[in-house]
Amino acid sequence: MQHDGHGATPIRLALVGIGKIAQDQHIPALQSDKSFELVAAVSRSGGIENLPCFTDIGDLLESGLDVDAVSLATPPQGRHAIAGAALDAGLHVMLEKPPAATVSEVADLAARARAAGVTLFTTWHSREAASVDAARDWLAGKTLRSARIDWREDIRVWHPGQEWILQPGGLGVFDPGINALSIVTAILADPLLLQSARLEFPANRQAPIAAQLSLRSGEAAAEAAFDFLQTGPQSWDIVLETDSGRLVLSDGGQRLAIDGAEISAGTDEEYPRLYRRFASLVRASASDVDLAPLQLVADAFLLGERVEVPPFSF
């Protein structure tokens, strides 16, 4: 089954988990990328037109279908077993964010990928937003004085009826909030360290609906506010004060302004860029496993003050 992706031969890929993110992002990106041939779906709730669909990863592996890689777009709970089976079978694996339910699970998958000699790619799609690279380049050599993250969106719009996201391991508001953390950890020179956190849990739920974090990066203080109950305009903004001016990343990293003047903007190419990166990793026989965003979320659960707020229902 193993395939290194060299030359013009497409990487034969099965998509595991055919939910909203797969339909909206993964399938269109794969269908437009000649480095891949989408050969199968693995899902209990719906497949991909004109492709075989398997109930679970075991059925795919036992089918004899020629497949080189899998991309997992399932909820993080239970993903470790699926990814582990694929890696042990010699398949390259790409993981939707967050890569697994725990930090320890990702560390184990990284070790298994090394042992099998295959690629593991823990993706952070917001790092591929149009202006993130430009922000990192502008910050190089500058001194950070303070940072502010405001990441506020409506769970009913972006995750309608998705009960898993408010269950243990679903991360709650950290499912979008981790996107902000993935950007900031990619563009700042110094590590981001959590100092304290306040987590707001609905009385009937096991994951937070809002969170406030206090962090540090070098000598600079950073504050983050995550809210899953934002109606009307949504905000995905990062404001960095430096010794050379104010940097504002908005629209989830799509737009960049310096001292109020927009210097970069672009269209949404996050998932096409992720799959181009996955193809290059497979061809280089390399992995890309970055735990920093997930570790910060784990730290928030470790240090966070838990506050009960009114019940939530979709």
Image (cartoon, rainbow, N blue to C red):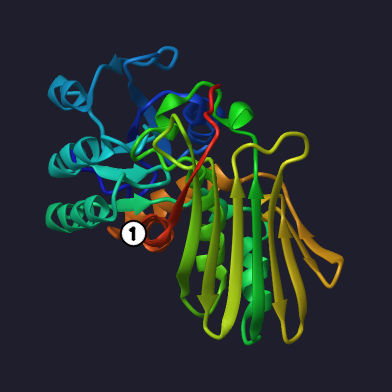
The crowd level at tag 1 (other Cα within 10 Å; few <14, some 14-19, many 20+) is some
Q: Nearer the viewer, residue 4 or 72?
A: 72
Report whether 138 appears left or right of 73: right
Name the residue located 34 percent from the left edge and 22 percent from the top edge. Answer: 41
Residue drawn at (40%, 49%), measured in percent from left and top? 279
Residue 263 coordinates in the image, percent (x, y): 81, 65
Position of the C terminus, as image quadrant, is top right
Residue 40 point in image, percent of width and height = 33, 23
Circle 1: residue type:
Val
Residue at the spot x=43%, y=42% of the render?
A: 35
| Image-based side of 23 in relation to 235, left or right | left
Residue 80 in the image: x percent, y percent?
23, 41
Q: Toward the viewer: 153 or 6?
A: 153
Horizontal side of residue 62 vs 20, given as left or right: left
Residue 156 location, quadrant: top right
Q: Does 289 sit above or below residue 50?
A: below
- In the picture of the structure, the residue carrying the numbered disc 1 is 289
Instruction: Say which element carries label 1.
Output: loop
